[in-house]
């Protein structure tokens, strides 16, 4: 977790962030309120990505986003993801 990298990312506009960074920032903001369960198709408009893009990025973020705990929770017509701040699990 790098405190110096966050402000630089926050100062960038949505257009300048990568898709992965946009999704990560969205998830970090949601995880501040506690754990969150979601299906990609229900957050796609908020993040500006397709459900398919979100699904692919979630797999990458599960391994790389140390600030978040990401679990593939269930599959009922689409994957449900569970996220929470890694600080909450410590």
Image (tube, grey):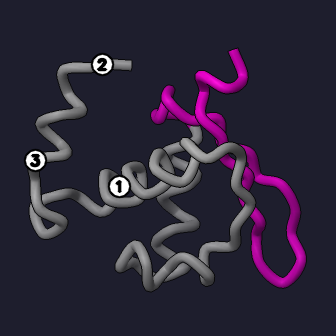
Check residue 82 for magenta coloring.
yes
- Residue 2 is labelled as 2
The crowd level at tag 2 (other Cα within 10 Å; few <14, some 14-19, many 20+) is few
Stretch of the chain drawn in magenta: 63-90
Q: Decide which of 57, 25 is in the foreground and name it.
A: 25
**What residue is rendered at 89% in x and 77% in y?**
76
Q: Decide which of 40, 88 is in the foreground and name it.
A: 88
- Residue placed under numbered mark 3 in the picture: 11
- Residue 50 is labelled as none
| Number of numbered tags placed on the structure image | 3
- Mark 3 residue element: loop
35 relative to 61 in the view: left or right = right
Which quarter of the figure has residue 42? Answer: bottom right
Circles 1 and 3: CB atoms closer than 8 Å: no
Give the percent coordinates (x, y) of residue 55: 57, 66
- Residue placed under numbered mark 1 in the picture: 20
The vertical placement of 69 against 14, above or below, is above
- Mark 1 residue element: helix
Q: CA distance from mark 3 to mark 2?
A: 15 Å
**What residue is rendered at 31% in x and 51% in y?**
21
Give the percent coordinates (x, y) of residue 28: 47, 45
Give the percent coordinates (x, y) of residue 32: 55, 42
- Mark 2 residue element: loop
Quadrant for the N terminus, please: top left
Q: CA distance from mark 1 to mark 3?
A: 16 Å
Give the percent coordinates (x, y) of residue 33: 61, 47
Q: CA distance from mark 2 to mark 1?
A: 17 Å
């Amino acid at each position: 977790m790098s405190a110096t990298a966050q402000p630089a990312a926050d100062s960038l506009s949505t257009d300048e962030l990568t898709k992965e960074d946009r999704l990560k920032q969205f998830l970090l903001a949601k995880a501040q309120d506690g754990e969150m369960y979601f299906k990609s198709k229900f957050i796609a408009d908020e993040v500006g990505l397709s459900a398919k893009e979100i699904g692919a990025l979630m797999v990458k973020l599960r391994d790389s986003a140390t600030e978040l705990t990401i679990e593939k929770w269930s599959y009922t017509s689409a994957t449900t993801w569970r996220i929470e701040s890694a600080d909450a699990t410590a």
